[in-house]
Image: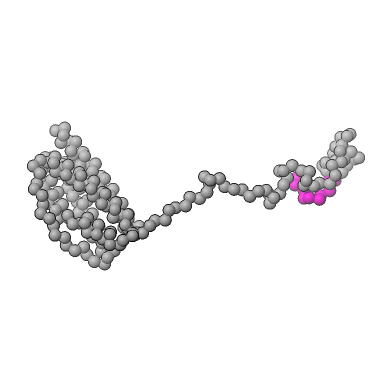
Amino acid sequence: MNYYPYEGYQPRRSGTGGGCGCGCNGGAGGVNRGPYTMANQPNYHMPIANQPMYQPMAYEQPMMKKPIEGPTAPQAVLKLLEEAVAGEKNDRIFYQQLIDLAPTKTEKDIIAVIRDDELAHFAQFRLIYRELSGKEISAQNATSPEEQPLSYMANLRQALFGEMAAVKKYRMIRAELTSKRHRDILFDIITDEFIHVGKYNFLITLNKRS
């Protein structure tokens, strides 16, 4: 049986009392409702085409991503990369001095891993610079190393704050990059720096208790 007859359909009748079209006589006092029309039917009989168009709620609207802006000054990132590797020679000296001052083999090994990470970072900065400019980073005149602090703890504190300053600079470099691969390299480097901060905090806490 078609439960959704079209407009103008004349239902089949039985008896004199008027029927509903299903074969019944509508009872003794049945009322002749006349031909089927859309006007005398409930709203759920309205065709879907006549229903108002569904309007998605605000939370269902697709989210628009903010476009990533490119670098405003290409030379800015090159300058930052030059600054990032300017202290490479001094850092090599500093880490070796820090390893020599470390009182235990465990601490020496921790600092050696940090040193190796930092040297790898310098190589990655040089690679990015070469790919962006087609040139090698010019040799920087290394400043003379500062006088070695007298205590191991003073060295650790200096290294800790040096790592935090490096994170700030590396975030600036990453913000100027447009290549996803270069940005991923900087993300890995920044992650390493946060790990180094945690290691230096461990070493400082360890020596406070000893």
Residue 70: percent from the left, percent from the top? 36, 59
The residue segment tinted magenta is 1-12
- The mark total stands at 0
* Residue 180 occupies quadrant: bottom left
Instruction: Decide whether the magenta segment is chiefly helix, strand or loop.
Output: loop
Tell whether 177 sits left or right of 38.
left
| Residue 117 visible to an observer of this rendering | yes
Q: Nearer the viewer, residue 188 or 151?
A: 151
* Residue at the image position 84 percent from the left and 46 percent from the top: 35
Q: Quadrant of the C terminus?
A: top left
The residue shown at (52%, 45%) is 59
Q: Where is residue 40 drawn, in percent x and y?
A: 78, 43
Residue under the point 83% across and 43% down: 21
Residue 103 in the figure: left or right of residue 184 = left
Is 43 or 108 nearer to us in this picture?
43
Question: Where is residue 97 shown, x and y percent of the image?
Answer: 11, 47
Q: Is residue 178 above or below residue 5?
A: below
Instruction: Kindly give the residue lying farthest to the front in the view shown.
Output: 72
Q: Is residue 29 above or below residue 170?
A: above
Which residue occupies the foreground of this view, 149 or 195? 149
Q: Is residue 116 magenta?
A: no
Q: From this viewpoint, which residue is outermost toward the right? A: 16
- Colouring scheme applied when the structure was drawn: one colour
- Residue located 26% across and 49% down the image: 168
> Is residue 131 rendered to the left or right of residue 67?
left
**Residue 118 point in image, percent of width and height:** 21, 52
Confirm whether residue 105 shows in the render. no
- The extreme top residue here reads 209
